[in-house]
Image: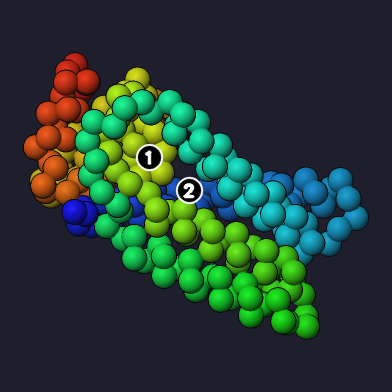
Amino acid sequence: MRAQMTLTAWSQGIANAMACAVGVFGTWLTIGWLVSLATDKTIAESGTVAFAVIWVGSLLGLVAGWVQGLSRRGTLLLDCGSHPTRWLFLANAVFFAIAGVCGSFATNTNMFVGPFGTLFALSFAAYWVFMGMGRLGIHEHGIWTYWGLMKWGRIKKYSWAADGTLLIRSNGPLSFLLRSAIPVPNERLAEFKRLLLQRLPTAPTT
């Protein structure tokens, strides 16, 4: 049993990725500028440091959120299986693992080749393995959205697309911009809706 990737999930995912890319790029420029002011590093070196800060911070934040959610999600009420693009995540993991090993033999070094590039590629491979192992489910204290817990109290609004995709706006400073789009397997759709309605009987729809 596995959900099918829907057009709604693809389109919302692309929109979220573009918004996040703009934010990451702005953060990268800001950190790089601050590093160049505080040190005598070149623009290229400052950019590498900024990239490393963002990447390490993002990984640590992802792992910390996963651990916290895992400890607080409570009893499993409904398991909806793995992500519909799990095979793509795992293929990415293999690709970056190979790239990391090959990059370790390079004689020149930069942000993506040499020791730094190898470390980045292998950590990216681990990230894709993590993504590939994600599952969707309803728990006692919220929805486990493949890689983290969305507590019931964080759900501001939700609605269902015609193709069975759950759209959620959560509480937070970027809720006006980003929405979660969660494909739910057809075999679990009716039960998923029933459990969701039980726990969010008064939540407004988007």
Which quarter of the image is occupied by the N terminus?
bottom left
Residue occupying the point 27% across, 57% down: 84
Distance between the alpha carbons at the discs numbered 1 and 2: 9 Å
Q: Nearer the viewer, residue 1 or 119?
A: 1
Residue 109 image position (x, y, % from top left): 77, 75
Question: Mark number for residue 178?
Answer: 1
Residue 33 in the image: above or below residue 179: below
Residue 75 in the image: above or below residue 130: above
Give left or right: position of 149 versus 54: left
Give left or right: position of 170 versus 64: left
Quadrant of the rendered image containing residue 34: top right
Residue 117 image position (x, y, % from top left): 68, 68
- Tag 1: amino acid: Leu
Whether residue 155 is visible to the viewer of this picture, yes or no, is no
Cβ atoms at labels 1 and 2 below 8 Å apart: yes
Residue 180 image position (x, y, % from top left): 32, 41
Question: Mark number for residue 20?
Answer: 2
